[in-house]
Amino acid sequence: MADYRLKNGIIVSFGKTPQSGDIGVSGERLLTIGKSSAVGKSAGRPAGGRVGNRAGSTGSAAQIDLKGNSFVYPSLINTHDHLQGNYLPAVSPKPGTFYLTWQPWDTDLKASATFAERSKLTRRELYRLSAYKCIFSGVTTVNDHFPHELNAKILPTLPIRAIQGYGLAHEAVSYDLKWGEGIQAEHKRAVKNNWPFITHLSEGFDGESMQSVDLLEKLGVLDSHCLLVHCIGFSDGDIKKVARAGASVSWCAGSNMLMFNVTARIRKMLKAGVNVTIGTDSSASGPVNFLAELHYVRELYRKLYGEELPPKTIFKMITLNAARAFKMQDSIGTLEAGKLADALVLKGRKDDPYENLVSASMKDIELLILAGKPLYGELRFLDLFGGKLPKAYTRIQVGKRPMFVIGDPAALYREVRRRVGFKKALDYLPFEVEQ
Ligand SMILES: [Fe+2]
């Protein structure tokens, strides 16, 4: 990509007061942020200390005028998904019942029409669907919680950043799926490489689930590398231990409520200072995409606690907190010169920038950028490509807006429908296709 600048947006990044200004992008990095910047001039000492060769470069930069009507955020980070499992509809327990652990859900999933249809697609097709689930909800970074031997060849082929550096376990119970090389070995590798160690934890209420924080502590692995997913059975003592250890939690409220009718004690975790992030889990148990999850957590918090979860708190969870949980805060999570240019441009529908983000829907996305590369956007931004859409992109119609998108999701959608033999609707794809 040639250098470019987005002008006259409202720049929103945690730790800074939102203000109108520009962002300058050079190669894969943010070169300049704010009003006084000028593309082609050095922005001074960049953040993160890992700046590509092109930062500081000059040249004729395309300029896109956002006309003061758009908010520019760091693109969103989903800390928990299973990219092989984003097929619809979600699989629920029988009406009026809920599960005790994840096991009976897994049994019900395998017996479901969702699973039967999904099995007609290749693993690569399922992963590509998941990449578009991310893109059309403003997410550029995600964890595919799945063993490396099953996803390592696919992740680098995706148009999004599905992190490849992580240690993992399935869960810390005797009946878990034995992913990875064991909790201690995987954690050790994570520490050595400064990766997160990611595991489901207390995804249920049986005796073992309730003891899982103690088990991590006993194994000597409860520390800031831990990204613990679900955590619904945590006691006060567990929350204190997790906060003290500097571990992170991936809150998957939609999935938890569908399966268990209970979720993590999130207010207590926030008060204790736990680094809380948000995950969707797969669409087979959670809301349809990340934006739907944001709407859901607000409603749920209001219902559970009788008060608002501040939109700014949610914003921090899905940007800076998530970057910290992935040990990537030096390169993503905020808009700062020298960091990777991961940016989400949303139509300004609300005065408050945080409210604007957490109430946004797929139709509000104007532009999504991953490491300087536009993934998805309105055709009015074609100047980013010198006026001509490169071959790696296609056009789709989202509502009344003609959009460009990386790859060919319309062809993928047609292929899904051909495989399953009917006009399947996947609601995270916000466009229609001719068969
Ligand atoms: Fe999960």
Image (tube, grey):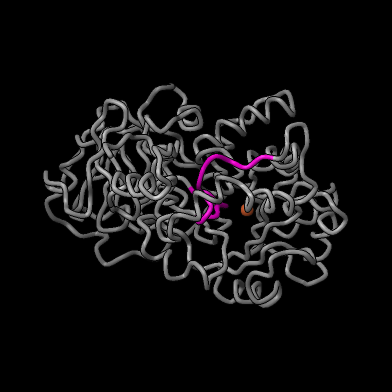
Where is residue 377? Give x, y as percent.
28, 40
Q: Is residue 244 above or below residue 389?
A: below
Q: Please give left or right for residue 25 compared with residue 203 in the image.
A: left
Identify the residue at horizontal 63%, vertical 53% (top origin).
110
Q: Please give left or right for residue 388 compared with residue 432 in the image.
A: left
Q: Please give left or right for residue 6 compared with residue 154 in the image.
A: left
**Foreground pick, 272 / 213:** 213
The part of the chain drawn in magenta is: 77-92
**Foreground pick, 254 / 236:** 254
Q: Is residue 271 visible?
A: no
Q: Is residue 159 above or below residue 315?
A: below
Q: Quadrant of the C terminus?
A: top left
Q: Is residue 85 magenta?
A: yes
Q: Is residue 210 above or below residue 51?
A: above
**Foreground pick, 262 / 383:** 262
The total of numbered circles placed on residues is 0
Where is residue 14? Give x, y as percent.
49, 42
Q: Is residue 100 visible?
A: yes
**Foreground pick, 387 / 223:** 387
Q: Residue furthest front?
A: 421
Identify the residue at horizontal 45%, vertical 59% (top origin).
162
Where is residue 327? Give x, y as percent.
54, 61
Task: Give the dominant element type of the magenta stretch: helix, strand or loop.
Answer: loop
Which image quarter: residue 90?
top right
Q: Quadrant of the N terminus?
A: bottom left
Identify the residue at horizontal 57%, vertical 44% (top origin).
317
Q: Is residue 429 magenta?
A: no
Which image quarter: residue 261?
top right
